[in-house]
Image (spheres, rainbow, N blue to C red):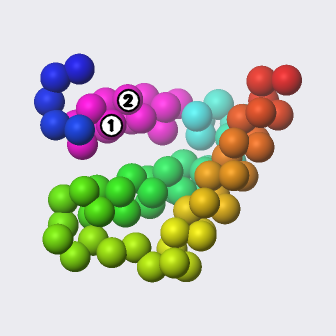
Amino acid sequence: MKGSPSQNTRLLFQPLGNSLPGLGRVPIEFHRNLITAEQIRLQGDYQSQGNVSPTQAQTLIDQAAKFITLAAQQIQ
């Protein structure tokens, strides 16, 4: 893929974000969590003061673990 890392990430995840909630197999909260995680990642990549607090980091880790658990359940 050509373009900035931000554009490439968006091109990769946008179709996922557009289709998953509509399928009813993934709760809408996970879609919101992915959007928030992307925004925080972009802050870290492109803003000089993109610091993530330990609390924010733990929240993202917890959300990712829940998403992985759900994904594993869906593919079994």
Picture quadrant where residue 29 is located: bottom right
Q: Which residues are magenta?
A: 6-19
Give how far across and how far down residue 69 sits, in percent: 77, 43
Left or right: residue 50 versus residue 59 is left
Query: Local crowd at mark 1 within 10 Å, few (<14), some, or many (≥20)?
Result: few
Label 1: element kind: helix
Quadrant occupied by the C terminus: top right
Q: Residue at x 54, y 49 (%)?
A: 31
What residue did someone put label 2 on? 12
- Residue 16 within the magenta-colored segment of the rendering: yes
Picture quadrant where residue 15 is located: top left
**Label pair 1/2, CB-CB below 8 angstroms:** yes
Depth check: 35 or 46 in front?
46
Label 2: element kind: helix
The image's mark for residue 20 is none
Q: Amino acid at mark 1?
A: Thr
Look at the picture and state if 3 lies above or below 41: above
Q: Would you say the magenta stretch is mainly helix, strand or loop?
A: helix
Q: Residue at x 22, y 76 (%)?
A: 49
Give how far across and how far down residue 44 sits, in percent: 29, 63
CA gap, disc 1 to disc 2?
5 Å
What residue did someone put label 1 on? 9
Give how far across and how far down residue 75 sits, in percent: 77, 24
Picture quadrant where residue 1 is located: top left
Look at the picture and state if 28 lies above or below 71: below
Q: Amino acid at mark 2?
A: Leu
Left or right: residue 28 versus residue 54 is right
Give how far across and how far down residue 62 sits, in percent: 66, 62
Left or right: residue 3 versus residue 60 is left
Look at the picture and state if 63 lies above or below 31: below
